[in-house]
């Protein structure tokens, strides 16, 4: 704010701050992804805090915490990506997505949603092969010795969820284009 501006004048950056986005109407509640991310993030905080306390007081480390933390970070990332896809809040190149005619913007939104759907379907398919190989060859984790597929099964599941959310976004964008 400039020194000569009135005290009640809005900050120039106020237009850049997103207001709370309106909640999209979807058939499968977004609370599923939100709560999954919240629970994983809470568990991640507790595990990390416990490891810090143990290291501080005993000069030892809880070796299993790193393994679990990496798993929880992956789940948080995929759950957040799923929620962002459903809310159409994923990363875009605004120069392209916000310029041009309304029809061009709708067409780019549909193409982006279809590309995302295809990408996450391929990722789900390839990660199913990874999980199957880990199961078949009985691979175990180095820290705890648990079966690796217990961790990696979430990659195809959440990738498929993101693909379904992206396809739902495509359908919503297609309906918007037809209604106008």
Image: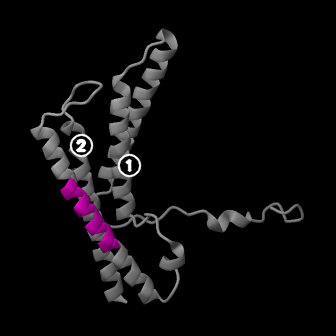
Which residue is nearer to you in this view: 79 or 33? 79
Q: Could you say where residue 96 lies in the image, as x and y percent from the top left?
A: 50, 79
Q: Among all residues in the image, which is located at the extreme front?
A: 137
Task: Look at mark 2 in the image and give the residue it sits on.
Answer: 152
Residue at figure coordinates x 14%, y 44% from the top left: 133
Label count reads 2
Q: Could you say where residue 65 lies in the image, as x and y percent from the top left?
A: 37, 26
Label 1: state its secondary structure. Answer: helix
Residue at figure coordinates x 39%, y 60% from the top left: 84
Q: Which residues are magenta?
A: 113-126
Residue at figure coordinates x 42%, y 89% from the top left: 103
Relative to 127, residue 163 above or below: below
Residue 162 is at least partly visible in this image: yes
Label 1 environment density (alpha carbons within 10 Å; few <14, some 14–19, many ≥20): few
Left or right: residue 117 versus residue 44 is left
Which residue is nearer to you in this view: 50 or 130? 130
Q: Among all residues in the image, which is located at the extreme right?
A: 4
Label 2 environment density (alpha carbons within 10 Å; few <14, some 14–19, many ≥20): many
Relative to 32, residue 151 above or below: above
Q: Quadrant of the N terminus?
A: bottom right
Give the alpha-carbon distance from disc 1 to disc 2, as whole Å.
14 Å
Q: Is residue 118 magenta?
A: yes
In the picture, residue 143 is in which quadrant?
Answer: top left
Task: Look at mark 1 in the image and give the residue it sits on.
Answer: 77
Label 2: state its secondary structure. Answer: helix
In the picture, residue 121 is in which quadrant?
Answer: bottom left
> Do labels 1 and 2 touch, CB within 8 Å?
no
Residue 27 is at least partly visible in this image: no
- The secondary structure that most of the magenta stretch takes on is helix
């Amino acid at each position: 704010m400039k020194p000569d501006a009135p005290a009640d004048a809005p900050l120039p950056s106020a237009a850049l701050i997103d207001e709370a986005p309106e909640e999209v109407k979807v058939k499968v509640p977004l609370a599923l992804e939100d709560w999954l991310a919240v629970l994983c993030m809470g568990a991640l905080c507790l595990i990390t805090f416990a490891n810090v306390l143990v290291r501080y007081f005993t000069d030892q480390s809880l070796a299993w915490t790193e393994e679990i933390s990496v798993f929880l970070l992956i789940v948080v990332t995929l759950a957040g990506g799923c929620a962002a896809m459903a809310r159409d809040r994923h990363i875009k190149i605004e120069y392209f997505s916000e310029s041009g005619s309304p029809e061009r913007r709708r067409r780019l939104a549909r193409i982006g949603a279809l590309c995302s759907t295809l990408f996450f379907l391929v990722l789900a398919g390839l990660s199913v092969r990874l999980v199957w190989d880990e199961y078949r060859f009985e691979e175990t984790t180095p820290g705890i010795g648990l079966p690796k597929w217990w961790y990696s099964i979430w990659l195809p599941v959440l990738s498929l969820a993101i693909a379904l959310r992206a396809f739902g976004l495509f359908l919503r964008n297609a309906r918007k284009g037809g209604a106008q």
